[in-house]
């Protein structure tokens, strides 16, 4: 759970005896914003990787089922060259 900015300021003062000047408060806010941006970026990257794994899995399944290459491309968004690479790595050929 994330603490509110006010709770963070109180904790810095109480636990670490750090006086909250305007300048220091601004720097803490910037650090918190940066950390939030990094977390958001990590989540976004993880979601993209998950989608890519799902697309790859779907492509592999469709190749194994001997679906037409145009259909595989349509459902996965992969170019035909990419599908040829995937099929080749699987020891399969495209229909």
Image (tube, rainbow, N blue to C red):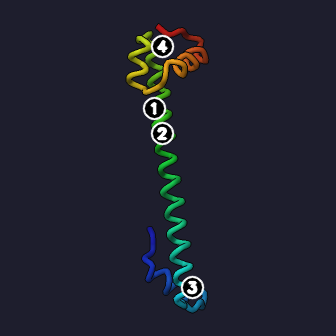
State the separation of the CA atoms marked 2 and 1.
Answer: 6 Å
Residue 93 image point, x, y percent: 54, 9
Q: Earlier in the sequence, mark 1 or mark 4?
A: 1
State the separation of the CA atoms marked 3 and 2.
Answer: 39 Å
Find out whether the residues at labels 2 and 1 contact each other: C-beta distance under 8 Å. Answer: yes
As drawn, 42 above or below 90:
below
Which numbered mark, 3 or 2, is in the foreground of this view? Answer: 3
State the separation of the CA atoms marked 4 and 3.
Answer: 60 Å
Q: Earlier in the sequence, mark 4 or mark 3?
A: 3
**Disc 4: which residue:** 64
Which corner quadrant holds the N terminus? Answer: bottom left
As drawn, 38 above or below 75:
below
State the residue at coordinates (38%, 24%). Answer: 75
Q: Left or right of 81: which side holds 65? A: left
Q: Earlier in the sequence, mark 4 or mark 2?
A: 2
Along the viewing direction, whichever of 66 and 70 lies nearer the viewer = 70
As drawn, 8 above or below 44:
below
Q: How many numbered marks have been drawn onto this rendered protein structure? A: 4
The numbered mark at residue 24 is 3
**Disc 1: which residue:** 54
Crowding at mark 2 (Cα within 10 Å: few <14, some 14-19, many 20+): few
The numbered mark at residue 50 is 2
Residue 78 image point, x, y percent: 47, 25
Crowding at mark 3 (Cα within 10 Å: few <14, some 14-19, many 20+): few
State the separation of the CA atoms marked 4 and 2.
Answer: 21 Å
């Amino acid at each position: 759970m994330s603490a509110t900015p006010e709770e963070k300021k109180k904790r810095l003062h109480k636990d670490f005896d750090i006086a909250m000047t305007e300048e220091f408060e601004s720097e803490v806010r910037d650090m918190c914003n940066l950390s939030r941006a990094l977390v958001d970026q990590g989540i976004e990257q993880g979601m993209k990787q998950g989608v890519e794994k799902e697309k790859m899995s779907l492509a592999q399944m469709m190749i194994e089922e001997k679906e037409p290459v145009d259909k595989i491309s349509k459902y996965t968004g992969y170019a035909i060259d990419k599908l040829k690479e995937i099929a080749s790595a699987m020891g399969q050929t495209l229909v």
